[in-house]
Image (cartoon, grey):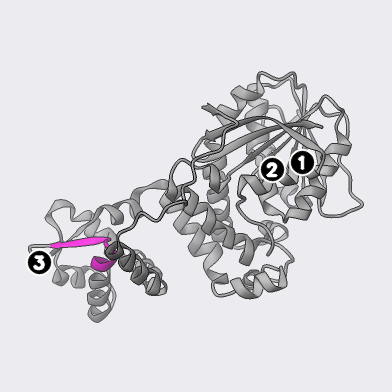
Amino acid sequence: MRNTNNEFKDLFSKDNRTSMDAIDRAQFIAFSPYIWEATKLLIETGILREIDASKNNGISFESLVEKIDFPPYGIRILLEASLGIELTYLKENKYRLAKTGYFLLHNEMTRVNYNFMKDVCEPGFGTIKESIEKEKPVGLKAFGDWPTIYQALSQLNPEVQKSWFAFDHFYSDRSFNEILEVLDKYPINSLMDIGGNTGKWTKAILSKNPQKKLGFVDLPGQINIAKQELKDFTHYDRIAWYPTDMLEKSNSLPKNFDAIWMSQFLDCFSDEQIISILKKCHEALDDDAYVFINETFWDRQEFKTSAFSLQMTSFYFTTMANGNSQMYDSKVFFKLIDKAGFKIEEIHDLLGHSHTLLILKKK
């Protein structure tokens, strides 16, 4: 665990690519729509799986034609594309899985990200500009008529739901154990979980500290999902349920909680909405209470690829989620915290895969 109040190094302050490397990347971007489609077909037809199964022996084009139920012409151009994408390499006239292909098939994080893009985001491809201009998730129309994806979650196709929750949980779940260690240092007997989702955090903290009282705040549809998920949980009776739309101006939060917890919740809202939600938290808490915010900030990552993944995820919020939120730059986010009347007491960076835990108190 790293505990820091220092600025992270700027991962994007230099252009270190050679001209040849840069033009290669530019071509990759230029052909990226076909790169996505070809990669998806290589997976869905089973071509990459057959190459993977061949191990070090490799497999010939002719053998793949016999094994794969797809036109030989299609197999040929997909295999040739797989070489350029660097999913495979060709040795002794046989295709073998390259490292990138291996990670695409076997790395859990990559698989979660890929399925999220394929099942949740792809139906809204091509709507970025319109979504930005209208400040609405225009791509969400592919699934139905909802103002945001959060009202839709409980009613989406099970496969889409599965990919959405897998993406959401993959990153947050891996930070929980480290965060629980931090929270143990604070005198908290009751905690309000805003945006509780399926109740994984509620279950985690009550399993470790069954004496605590938990308040669960979310949309009615999400609360129904969480109740179903937690119905057999040993400490179910320690949970109080508060169906609440945090964007409804007339709604307020319950009082008499020692602290508020929000994990991967505030990134689901615009700047102004975040300030509004935090002000509601401010009104609900006593002066000595705490707010814990667990978020992924692209500027507080150790690796450039992590920052890139978060920057690209912002377009999911644009086209599918709500049309006006993002994975935030911490410098932007911290200003919103200040405007809402809070100060940052502690910052714990690089928890789990990529999370930052902020501990706030009233100014």
Q: Is residue 89 magenta?
A: yes
Start and end of the magenta stretch?
82-90
Q: Residue 173: x percent and y percent? A: 55, 38
Q: Amino acid at mark 2?
A: Phe
What residue appears at the point 48 percent right and 64 percent down from the top-left corner? 118
* Residue closest to the eye, 352 or 310: 310
* Residue closest to the eye, 276 or 198: 276
Q: Residue 153: x percent and y percent? A: 66, 57
Q: Residue furthest left?
A: 92
Q: How many marks?
A: 3
Q: Nearer the viewer, mark 3 or mark 2?
A: 2
Residue marked by disc 3: 93
Q: Secondary structure at mark 3?
A: loop
Residue marked by disc 1: 338
Q: Secondary structure at mark 1?
A: helix
What residue appears at the point 26 percent right and 52 percent down from the top-left corner? 99
The quadrant the C terminus occupies is top right
Q: Residue 26: x percent and y percent? A: 37, 69
Left or right: residue 28 versus residue 93 is right
User: Is the Cβ of the residue at disc 3 closer than 8 Å to that at disc 2?
Assistant: no
Q: CA distance from mark 2 to mark 1?
A: 6 Å
Left or right: residue 332 versus residue 238 is left
Q: Amino acid at mark 1?
A: Asp
Q: Nearer the viewer, mark 1 or mark 3?
A: 1
User: Is the Cβ of the residue at disc 2 closer than 8 Å to that at disc 1?
Assistant: yes
Mark drawn on residue 334: 2
* Residue closest to the eye, 136 or 24: 24
Label 2 crowd (10 A; few <14 / some 14-19 / many >=20)? some
Q: Amino acid at mark 3?
A: Asn
